[in-house]
Image (tube, rainbow, N blue to C red):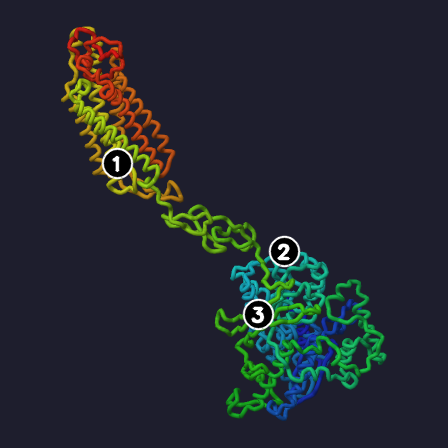
Amino acid sequence: MDPPIYLRFLVYLTISVAVSGKPTCKLKGKFNLNSFKMPGDVMVGGMFPIHHRVVSYNASAGTAPQSLGCEGFNFRAFRWARTMIYAINEINQNDLILPNIKLGYTIYDSCFTIAKAVEGTLTYLTGQDEAVPNYRCGSGAPLAVLIGAGGSALSIATARILGLYYFPQVDYSASCSVLSDKFQFPSFIRTIPSDTFQSRAMAKLVMHFGWTWVGTIASDDDYGKYGIKSFKEEVENAGVCISFSETIPKVYAREKIVRIVDTIEKSTAKIIAIFSADIDLSSLIEEVMQRNISGRTWIASEAWINSALISKPEYSSLLGGTIGFAIQRADIRGLRNHLIQLDPRNSGEKLITEFWERAFDCMWPEQGVAVSRMLDYKTAEYNRTDADIKNRIHIISPLSQRFCTGTENLDEIDNTYTDVSQLRLTYSVYKSVYTVAHALHNMYTCKTGEGPFANGSCTNLKDFQPWQLMYYLKNVRFKSLLGEEIYFDVNGDIDAMYDIINWQKTSNGYISYKVIGNYNGTAPPGQEMIIHNDSIIWNDDQITPPFSVCSEGCQPGTRKGIRQGEPVCCFDCIPCADGEITNETDSRECIQCPEDYWSNANRDECLHKVVEFLGYDDALGITLIALSIFGACIAAAIAIVYMVRSDTALVKANDLGLSLVLLFSLVICFLSSIVFIGQPVAWSCMTRQVLLAVSFASCLSCLLSKAVNLMFKARAAKAKSPEGREKKSLRPCQQRLIALIIVLCHACLCIAWLLIFPPYPVKNTLSQNIKIIMECNEGSVVFLCCVLGYDALLAGICFIFAFIARKLPDNFNEAKFMTFSLLVFFIVWISFVPAYLSTRGKYMVAVEMFAILASSFGLLACLFVPKCYIILLKPERNTEELVKGNTDTSDKSAPPTSQSLTCSGISTACSTVTLNE
């Protein structure tokens, strides 16, 4: 990067002097500087931006370049310069500091431009108006230090020059953090805190009020760039997002100002942090005022928080509620009297006469002065075509025709110069002067043999080198007006102490500076900042802090969903998925609930899942239990009827033993369904399917033995040859053996299942998210299919045999009832499969119980109800003759029996029992 123009100019002058072979020097230019001067034993330099800028000048290659004059008088900076004079006079009158030593001063006007600051620095070092770099051409008192130059950009320029000679510089307003770099600026110290602390304090302020969407504006100089850079780093590390970042041009350009204001107006950020000097900021505020952009809260840096140029009454409606940081304030006793004790008639100082003209809106009667002042303002201000330029500086309109007398009373006017209510940078100037004085005093009181230099030597106050004074400045320590201890760290910085200021609108429309807290950079972490929130009045006289976010905070139950291509503070709030929660605001991720828990409707709490099973206290469970007991009681009642009427023909013909086994099995079928109710435990899981399967196998085995017997009898009845009719049916013992073998085989299969893969209770958390379904894991699906398939195979074989026997002689219909009962059995269980698969939880158990009960009732009704009807209601039909089928009858209501084919005469067609009414 190319070096700054002032350094190239300096190098050029240095080389021209050092390399020239001629014995004389050739003057390259003469500087036009405004100054205050007073001789003394030791000279202290000062530099203040008493004017706002240099006069515009259209230079051409055909004319000799000139050192430009300045325009736009700055009352505030003039007060700083006068404060330096007051402090030096106060020290000269104090016998405790530098006794018998008189301090003198040379104060230059930097015009708030780098060029003038460099001119003043070179002139001060040279000792004459014609600057000769590397040479001290003047004679007289030694130069001690330069106080200034009044702004970070200006001080950086002067510090680079003074650092070449290790010449001390004490600054009162340059807070830029880069000046803490002792490699670049070895001879620079300051009585204002570094912006490193101010940026950190502003970031803590933003975080204190929970603002996450902030705009930033900085002046186009080192102060603005470094300050806003540190601020952005601090807030971004804390999760705050920057809505926009704009730069105010140093040279006024309306199109750039309009673009910045457009950005402010379009942005949704309600908080805007500004690092800028008041002079640079004034044009932007004027444009904001013209556009009437309200509803914004401004965070101010110390450079403009107490500036009268910005806190004008006409701006109060827009800037009220501004909050920012200011260096410590002090009351300097006697300063105001010193400020108003000016006599322009006897001073001979150009700056004082100009100040008088601007303060009292008059002009001096001397022709030369009056003409020069009028000409300056005609050419500099009122011949400009852009009216906005006049609005961006704090000047008075053209001088009136009234002449100044010099007897006007400064005590009667109210302007920035005479206002001593907010002495902050003024106090910093005061501390800078006393810092130099105490360092010189320590040098002056040094005792030979105890000094800091070689062999304990000291130096002569009236003949010392700049680096020697630099040692004393770095090690100075004294108490200030406020009782604070002034000292410098290794970077030449003092402790950071700020007041937090709130701009509050008064009843007459003015802005008052209300201290609502403070910041102490040396306090323990977390205790640096104290804010009294109830003392703050925000924009539009609100007492609640403004709200500035890109997106509303995500409430519990939602998480942040980052928008692609936008800052992290801009997001969508996405509801948590089922089974996930967030119990905090602005959560980035949802938390998965534990296995036995589930999210509530708001997704902000994990609730224990509902444990579901078909309980004994459930209405559905009670109903099914009642049906089971009812069915078991009916089966038991029929068994009792059979045993009581065991001597009747119909009971004998139906094989009492098989019938009782069948009825007992149905009782077990009914009662086995009760095991499905209640919370599954190990024994119930192992029992219910096995008990059901065995009881059904017992029923079906009895039916199968009867069906086989009916099939044999049916074939015998259909046989045409005598040999075929003589075939015998199965004996009762054979039927019972068949049933026993079938049941034993099934029992062995069930025992193997229970021993190898026994069923066990499980928590089913997958079927339904909000419930824990207590159910049984069957252990092995293969064994389950084999067990149930065995019953299905028995039912199928039995159905086939019964179906074959259905075409016995017309009056014989037991096979038809058996076929019908098995059809009911199949219909129930075929319907059960889709119904079972389409339900969950306790209703699956209910469906299975219903299938068990339905099939059991089907078997009971189809097989035993017709027989009980004859036994109980038609006992006259229950005779040996009718059962053996010896009497013809047209009554076909008699029930079929498996033994009705045992007719005494096989030569006749086998007939069923027929009874007349």
Q: CA distance from mark 2 to mark 1?
A: 71 Å
Of circles 2 and 3, which is in front?
Answer: 2
Query: Is residue 17 visible to us here?
Result: no
Q: Quadrant of residue 532?
A: bottom right
Which residue is more in the foreground, 367 or 820? 820
Query: Of the residues under marks 2 and 1, which one precedes in the sequence?
Result: 2
Picture quarter containing residue 839? Answer: top left
Q: Label 3, label 1: how many angstroms apart (C-alpha)?
A: 79 Å
Q: Earlier in the sequence, mark 3 or mark 1?
A: 3
- Dot 2 or dot 3, earlier in sequence: 3
**Label 3 secondary element:** helix
Residue 117: percent from the left, percent from the top?
68, 75
Q: Which residue is mark 2?
A: 267
Whether pointer 3 and pointer 1 mark residues with C-beta atoms closer than 8 Å, the reply is no
Q: Which residue is mark 3?
A: 198
Q: Amino acid at mark 3?
A: Gln
Gap in Å between the C-alphas at discs 2 and 3?
25 Å
Q: Judge from the rendering whether residue 348 lies leftward or rightward of residue 173; answer left or right.
A: right
Q: Name the kind of residue labelled 2 in the image.
A: Ser
Residue at 79% across, 68% down: 381
Whole-percent x, y for residue 889 in the image? 24, 9
Residue 266 in the image, given as x and y percentages of width and height: 65, 55
